[in-house]
Image: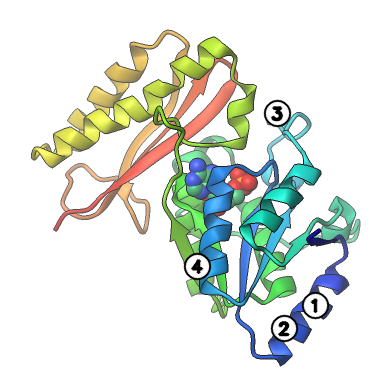
Amino acid sequence: MINAVHKIEEVKKQVNEWKKQNLKVGLVPTMGYLHEGHKSLIDRAVKENDKVVVSVFLNPLQFGENEDLDKYPRDLERDLEVCEKAGANLVFNPEVLEMYPESSCSYVNVENLTKGLCGAKRPVHFRGVCTVLTKLFHIVSPDKAYFGEKDAQQLAVVKKMVKDLNFNLEIVGCPIIREEDGLAKSSRNIYLSKEERKAALILNKSLKKANSLMENGERNAAKLKEIIENEINSETLAKIDYIEIVDSENLEKLDKIEKTVLVAIAVYIGKTRLIDNFTFKLN
Ligand code: AMP
């Protein structure tokens, strides 16, 4: 069985041994309840590194007060199986107090990029993400760390943090893995009832429609957003949180599609908030 450790010192000791042998280390940070999306990140990390660490840590710092921290699904045993099968070498599964002792009072904040999109309604979220990732980067000292394009804002924020703060690692973005019917895989999909699961297809469907209009030359962001809005509103169980078209790097809102853009949406299906996106590249 794969080695699962719970203490920071244990990870550091193992990584130190690997580094002494000049081995490349990849890190895949997760909150657990692993699915094919996470697995694709681990697969990529295994291909590109000598050793792979997967962190499984439900980070309380990135959840707001009324969010789903308490009911977030967990299944460490299954997670370990997924990691082992994918060829990872170490799972880091710390307790909350191991990561945040009571005396802990330091945070990492990336500004600007965290104001809009998910950051608008989740004001503490990215501070929590950046703080935990900073800690994980220091603990694991990876050569590369792997993130899903599913969380496009997170990926842009982490890239910016790494650049601004001179972290010595490469951030690798990996494509969104979807169910056969198009729904982006997510640990939160388990919250959906059968009816909601069907309704959730509206996210991908609305984005596909916008993508095909863009491919056919539509360049007006307001018009594209309206089309996505109408499509989502045709689904009675869906309630829009946001629809945004932004610069894919700095995440600033755009009126016209003139460069590579990120089209990102967040939609409540019943009580479950789902996100999806695509990047449109202009040649
Ligand atoms: P989470 O456990 O939700 O924090 O996700 C851990 C990592 O897996 C993040 O970098 C996510 O972007 C990535 N991820 C989650 N779902 C998917 C997916 N469907 N496809 C690709 N990557 C994903």
Marks 2 & 1, CB-CB < 8 Å contact: yes
Mark nearer the N terminus (1 vs 4): 1
- Residue 187 coordinates in the image, percent (x, y): 62, 36
**Figure disc tally:** 4
Question: Which numbered mark, 2 or 3, is in the foreground of this view?
Answer: 2
Q: CA distance from mark 2 to mark 1?
A: 6 Å
Rendered position, 86 above or below 152: below
Q: CA distance from mark 1 to mark 3?
A: 38 Å
Marks 4 & 3, CB-CB < 8 Å contact: no
Q: CA distance from mark 2 to mark 3?
A: 41 Å
Give amino acid for label 1. Answer: Gln
* Relative side of 245 to 259, left or right: right
Label 3: few (<14), some (14–19) or many (≥20) C-alpha neighbours in 10 Å = few
Marks 1 & 3, CB-CB < 8 Å contact: no
The residue wearing badge 2 is 18
Residue 110 seen in the current view: no
Front-most of residues 63 and 144 = 144
At 75% from the left edge and 29% from the top edge, which residue is drawn?
71
- Residue 65 coordinates in the image, percent (x, y): 73, 33
Secondary-structure class at tag 3: loop
Q: Which mark is residue 223?
A: none
At 47% from the left edge and 65% from the top edge, which residue is drawn?
172
Picture quarter with the N terminus: bottom right
The residue wearing badge 3 is 66
Marks 2 & 4, CB-CB < 8 Å contact: no
Give amino acid for label 2. Answer: Trp
Mark nearer the N terminus (4 vs 3): 3
Q: CA distance from mark 2 to mark 4?
A: 20 Å
Rendered position, 148 above or below 167: above
Question: Which numbered mark, 4 or 3, is in the foreground of this view?
Answer: 4
